[in-house]
Amino acid sequence: MSTIKELEKKARIIRLGILEAIGEGQKSHIGGSMSSADLVTALYFHKMRHTHENPKDPKRDRLIFSKGHAVLAQYAALAECGYFPKEELKKTKTLGSLLQGHPEIRTPGIEANTGSLGQGLSIGLGMALGAKLDHKSYKVYVILGDGELAEGQIWEAANTASFYKVDNLIAIVDYNKLQAVGFLKKRYDLGDIRGKFNIFGWKTFEIDGHNMEEIVNTLDEIDSIKGLPSAIIAHTIKGKGISFAENNPIFHNAPLSREQIEKAKKEIQGETILEVKN
Amino acid sequence: MNNQENLRQAYGKELLKWAKKDERIIALDADLCGSTQTVFIEKEIPQRFFEMGIAEQNMTSVAAGLALVGKIPFVNSFAVFSVGQAYNQIRQGIALPRLNVKIVGSSCGLSDFGDGATHQSIEDISIMRAIPNMTIIVPVDAIETRKVVGEVIKYKGPVYIRINRNDLPNVTKESDQFKIGKMQKITEGKDVVIFACGLMVSQSLKAREILLPQGISLRIINVSTIKPLNKEEVIKFSRDIKKVITAEENNVIGGLGGAICEALEDQEMKITRIGINDEFGQSASCYEDLIKYYHLTPEDIITKVKNLINQ
Ligand SMILES: Cc1ncc(C[n+]2csc(CCOP(=O)(O)OP(=O)(O)O)c2C)c(N)n1
C-alpha cells in the first residue's frame, strides 16, 4: 500500500507520461488528461485490484474513461504499471500504434471503446450488472467529463443504475469547469451537478480532485456503501500541472512546442528529481 | 489546382454572410464551433447561434422544432456525431416530415486524422443515402462550398452537407455554376471516366496529370450532389467510354460508388469502386499517412485505371 506522498510522486510520473504521449507538434488533449491525472493515479496505484500480468483477470476492478479523449492519462498509468512498454507512449496516435487517439480494447488494460462522449457510464453499468449476475465483487469506475454530462445517455444510465441498485458502479466526474470550446458556466451551464446525481438516486461526494488524501479516502469510503451507486464530483483544474495550460481553453486539444514541453516537464518535476524507470 | 483553401472556414464565413441577410438562419452547435467554424456566426450574431452542449440528439430534434416554426436551422458537429449520434432524430423527426433542416457533417472522412476511428466518418454518406427525402452534398473545394451554402438555403427540405477538415486544392472556378442535382465535368478524357467527390476529385486530377504523357486520358466528373443522383447525367458521361471508376473518401459500400452502380445497373459497363474498403479508420500523425494507408492516392487511382483498361 502506497503512502499519500508516494502516490503524489506517482501522479507526477503519470503527468510526465502524458507529456511523453503528447510529443512535439501533435494536437493532443492536454487539458482533460492532466486534470484526470490524480484521480487515475489513486485508482491504479491505490484502489483498484488489477495486475498487468493478467490484464483479463475476470475478478479485476475496471476503469473506463468515458471522456475517451483524455485517455493519455490512462495510457501513462498503464505503461507505468507495465501493461505495455513505456516506449509505446511516444508512438501514441501515429499510424499503426497500439495507442490510438481514443481508447480501444485491443490495448492491454483498456476496458471499453469510448471516444464518442456519453456512452461510458452505460458500458460501465453493463459490466457492473454482469458482476452481480456472476456473483463477483469487482467494481467499475467510470471517469466522466463535466461537458460530457450534457449527453442525455448519461442520465439514462444514472437512472438505470439506481433503479437496479448497482452499488459496484462508481462515477467520477472530472469537474474542470471547461468543455472543448470554453467555460461551461458561460457556454452551457450544467447547474448543480451533485444535486442532479442526488435526485437520480446516487450517493454523492464532492472533493478536490487534486488532493490525493481526499481522493483516496473517498474511494475507500465508497467500498462500504451498499444498495446504490456512488458519484464523486471531483473539482479539478483543466491542464493541472502545466502553468500555461491551466484553465486555458486553448489547451483542450492543442500541440505543444519543444520549449513548451521542456517548460511543462520542469514544472511537473518540481524540486525533486523523479526516478523514471523504464 | 495549386491553391489550397479550407472548406470549413469557407462554410463558416459564407453561412455568416447569408445569416446577415436572412433572419431565418440559425446555427446550432454541440461544443465544436471552433472546428465547424460556426464561431463566425456566434461572434457576429450571437442571438442566432445556440451552444447546445455536447448533446447532439437534443440539438437535432430542436432543429426540427425550429424548422417547424419557419426557421432555417443548420445543425453542426463532426460527421460521425451529426449523422451517427442523431440518426434516429434525423430519420423520424426531420427526413420523414421533410423538414427544412440542414445537417452539417464536419471533419468528415479521415480528415480528423489524429483522433482515430471514433472521429472518422467512413459511412455517413451511406447512412444518409438510405434515408428517403434526404439530399446529400459533398462540396469539392472552398469555392464550391460557398455556393453550396447559398443553394441549400434556397432549397426547402432536409440536406446533409459533408465538409472536410483540411485544406483542399481548388478544382472549380468562381464562374462555375453549382446546382443541387447537377454534376460537373472537370476534365474531358477518352479512356476512363471517374465519378468522384470531395478530396478524391483532386486526387483523380493528379492521377490524370501523371497518365497524360502515357497516352491515357481521364474524364473526371465532380459529383457533389450524391443524392438525388442524376441518373441521366451518369449515363451520358459514361455511355461512350464504358469504363467507369468511382472514387470517394467513404466506405465502398453504399456511398457514391454504390449510387453510380445503381444508376448504371442496366448498362453494359465495367465499374471499379475506389474508397475505404469496409474497415474503420485509425489515428495517424498526418492526413497523408491515412490517405496512403487506405489506398486513396493518385497512384492507387492509376493502378485501378490501368487494370480497367487492360481488362
Ligand atoms: C458525442 C461526441 N460529441 C462530440 C465530441 C467531440 N469532443 C471531444 S472532447 C469534447 C469536450 C469534452 O469536454 P469535457 O467532457 O468537459 O471533457 P474535458 O474538459 O475534461 O476534456 C468534445 C465536444 C465527442 N468526442 N463525442
Image: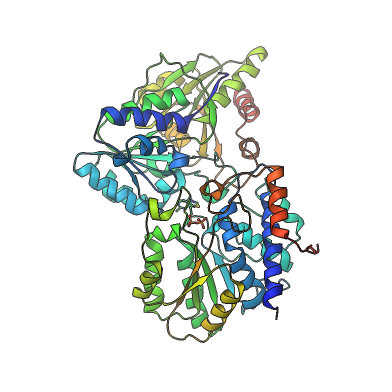
- Report the colour scheme: rainbow
How far across and how far down the image is residue A266, in percent? 73, 54
Q: Does B238 appear above or below A195? A: above
B62 or B297, which lies in front? B62
Q: For this view, does A129 lie left or right of residue B150?
A: right
Quadrant of the image occupied by residue B297: top right
Q: Does B152 appear above or below A235? A: above
Please tell me how many numbered marks the rendered image carries.
0
B34 or A251, which lies in front? A251
Q: For this view, does A87 lie left or right of residue A260?
A: right
Residue in the image at 44% along x and 22% along y: B143
Q: For this view, does B184 lie left or right of residue B302?
A: left
The residue sitting at the left extreme is B69
How far across and how far down the image is residue A148, in percent? 45, 58
Q: Does A161 appear above or below A275? A: below
For the question of whether residue B55 can be seen, the reply is no
The residue sitting at the front extreme is A271
How far across and how far down the image is residue A55, in percent? 67, 71
Residue in the image at 39% along x and 55% along y: A185
Residue in the image at 58% along x and 15% along y: B217
How far across and how far down the image is residue A235, in percent? 50, 66
For the question of whether residue A204 can be seen, the reply is yes
Q: Quadrant of the N terminus of chain B?
A: top right
Q: Quadrant of the C terminus of chain B?
A: top right
B142 or A174, which lies in front? A174
